[in-house]
Image (spheres, grey):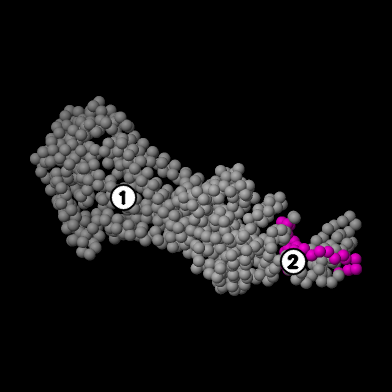
Amino acid sequence: MELEIINLTKEFKEIIAVDHINLSMKNGVYGLLGVNGAGKTTFMRMLCTLIRPSVGKILCEGKDIFEMDGEYRKILGYLPQEFGFYPDFTVQDYLMYVASIKGIRQTAAKKRTKILLQQVGLSKVQNRKMKKLSGGMKRRVGIAQAMLNNPKILILDEPTAGLDPSERIRFRNLISELSQDRLVLLSTHIVSDIEYIANQILLMQNGKIFHSGTQEEILNEVPIRVWRLDVRKSEVEHWQAMYKVANLKTMPQGAELRILSEQCPDTNAKEEELTLEDVFLYYFGEKAGNNDDVL
Amino acid sequence: MMMYYEIKKIFVKRGNRVALAVLAFAIIVIVYSLVSQTYWVNENGEMETGFGTIRKIKEAKQEWSGSLTENQIARVIEEKNRINATPQHQSEDMRQQEIAYSWTQGFQDITYLLNYAYGDFQTWDYTVADSLTPDMASDFYPNRMKSLKKWLEEEEGGANLFTDKEKAFLMEQYENLETPFFYEYQEGWKNLFQWASGIAMITALVLGFLCAGIFADEFRQKASAIFYSSYHGRGKAIWTKVTAGLLTVTVVYWAAMLAYSAAVLGIFGIEGSNCPIQSTMAGWKSFYQITNGQEYLMILFGGYLGCLFMTGAVMLVSAAAKSSLLAVTIPFLMIILPSLLMSMNSPTLNKILGLLPDQLLQISSVVKYFNLYEIGGEIFGAVPILAAVYLLLTFILIPMMYFTYKKHQVTR
Ligand SMILES: Nc1ncnc2c1ncn2[C@@H]1O[C@H](COP(=O)(O)OP(=O)(O)O)[C@@H](O)[C@H]1O
Ligand SMILES: [Mg+2]
């Protein structure tokens, strides 16, 4: 399965949400990383034919997805960022309905629903109403519905947002499990999600995908190094003003800083291994300090 | 399977269940009030009400059933005069008067017709029947035409309300009405017609409420992203929504109307289905040559079409606006606005009002109005025009909602 994105642009009244993206994707897990407002959701909506691009094209195996219409959506699975459902439906009803609009026959849908419910660990609550589910359970139903038609292209918009740490781990494992033999694109603003599951990373900012590659490639290409430095508490502000500080750990006698810098900032500094986290901070600046990310 | 869940979406919603319960409750209250309003004055001059009186009324009225010939009219006048001459009728004592009244109940419907036939076209004077003699019976049917003719000539009557062609049409309709009427007990139909439009209107409101969410809820519940990104999301799944709406209208409307009819006719009896509607006071002036049974069918199908159209409009607006807020008000406006405007009593306005969709919900009134329309040199009553216009409009609404909904993008 190959998706080719050519010059893809979406303008809203004042903003260019997606700005001339050119990209080619094959089977594998792509992690779309960017801060809020980067344009991830808008990009994904276009990939799901929900929004028509202002300029540009999306080709699936060489064919325009908007012209393919149903034929394209048949191989598509989508978990939207804000996952809406029918609150009075049971989990079973909900999945059976989505199966029906995906064109799956009843007997096949029943089998598939049963397997997926098991896979996402929701067999026990299949008769519970959607509105009675916890946030994490809802998200798992969301994944299940996306997988109903065994999609060749799976698009997950911030699938781990709002989950607690243990649920997030379960979710990552689930996504890894489901990602065999498909093209999976998942967006997040949480670095650790990507570190664990994505083989390809797409960095997005202001509507542009400005960098992409495997984790290694990205780490190698970043013109930055990371240093550990123990300082006195009174010096912290000084260092923060001088350098990007990835982490600050206060100790009884002072503070331990993680500093991003091309050159060694101080003779006492020890070079450490660069992580995606550092890259994120480097590219996205202050916004990277995300409390959401506990892992 | 898609249809099953689409319908299920409508009926699992709590608000919708409440609306249906309200409808069922309204039907029960209305039928109950019809029964409790029924009264009978017994031979002791005491008033009885409720269910037990129905049989007595039926027995009394059935004695006067049959062709309403001059002979029969003369018999009624004679009997009326005989009772008027009794000491009970002339007594000062209320109880005695009530006893005299009790003897008139069997032919009361016919007495009411006499009041119209021998009275003025526009006024209802209940004493008219007391001033007749049996030899006047032969005027009964001719008088119906005469009083229309007179009224159509009066300046303050119908002279300025109709064109000559329309006047001729009315006269012709009156003349063509088959006489003598067949008369029999017909309380079932009378009661049925009394609240049929009320039930149809409540049903239309409830249906608007039920169906407003079919399109809008996908957006309200943010389920639209998954809906539109699915295989059938811009095709069959939308048709299924359209069909689910039509099916809901069909099922709920017929269930409500047939439950109401079955209850009323079951309680009051189905006798009188072959009587012309002119054989009771309510339909005396109508120019439609139909029986109670035929009026009933017109009410049923008119109401169905009215509900289809109104719900169709609701669905179109909710499909376009992606919100049901504005949409649910449509049936209210369609029902309430015309009745407010009607009170302005302007003839041209009334002509327009006569073709608004709420009329379909109240065919029992429409068949009594003199709303006439000239098309291609022919005069028509409102009923055939309403049927044609709204059948067409409803057929247009259906693809409109489909295409309106199909083109939406999901931007939030
Ligand atoms: N429907 C819309 N109308 C106008 N602006 C929008 C709309 N959707 C998104 N935007 C804007 O486009 C930009 C990108 O938003 P979005 O795609 O949601 O980013 P992300 O998913 O990365 O947070 C933001 O500035 C957002 O305000
Ligand atoms: Mg987003």
Q: In this view, does A6 lie to the left or right of B39?
A: right
- Amino acid type at circle 2 is Glu
How crowded pointer 1 is (Cα within 10 Å; few <14, some 14-19, many 20+) is rated as some
Question: Which chain letter matches label 1?
Answer: B
SS at circle 2: helix
Stretch of the chain drawn in magenta: A265-293
Q: Which amino acid does label 1 sit on?
A: Phe
Q: How many labels does the image show?
A: 2
Assess whether residue A273 is covered by the magenta stretch: yes
Q: In which quarter of the image is residue B412?
A: bottom right
Q: Which residue is drawn at 18% across and 57% down?
A: B169
Q: Does the residue labelled 1 lie within 8 Å of ligand 1?
A: no
User: Label 2: chain?
Assistant: A
Residue A124, horizontal then vertical, whole percent: 60, 43
Residue at image location 17% in from the left, 41% down from the top: B182
Front: mark 1 or 2:
2
Tell me the distance, in whole angstroms, between the alpha carbons under discs 1 and 2: 73 Å
A24 or B38, which is in the foreground? Answer: A24
Task: Please determine whether, in this image, residue B391 is positioned above or below residue B280.
Answer: below
User: Residue A227 location, x and y as percent?
Assistant: 84, 65
Q: Which is more toward the observer, B214 or B209?
A: B214
Label disc, if present, on residue B284 of the rendered structure? none
Image position, residue A263 (x, y; %): 84, 72
For mark 2, what is the residue? A216
Position of B249 with respect to B47 (left or right) is right
Give the camera-side residue of B227 and A206.
B227
Outermost residue toward the left in this view: B135
Please rate how many residues cluster around mark 2, counting C-alpha atoms within 10 Å: few if below 14, some from 14 to 19, many from 20. few
Asked if badge 1 and badge 2 are on a common chain, one would say no
| Disc 1: which residue | B301
Please determine whether, in this image, residue B129 is positioned above or below residue A223: above
Visible residue check, residue A136: yes
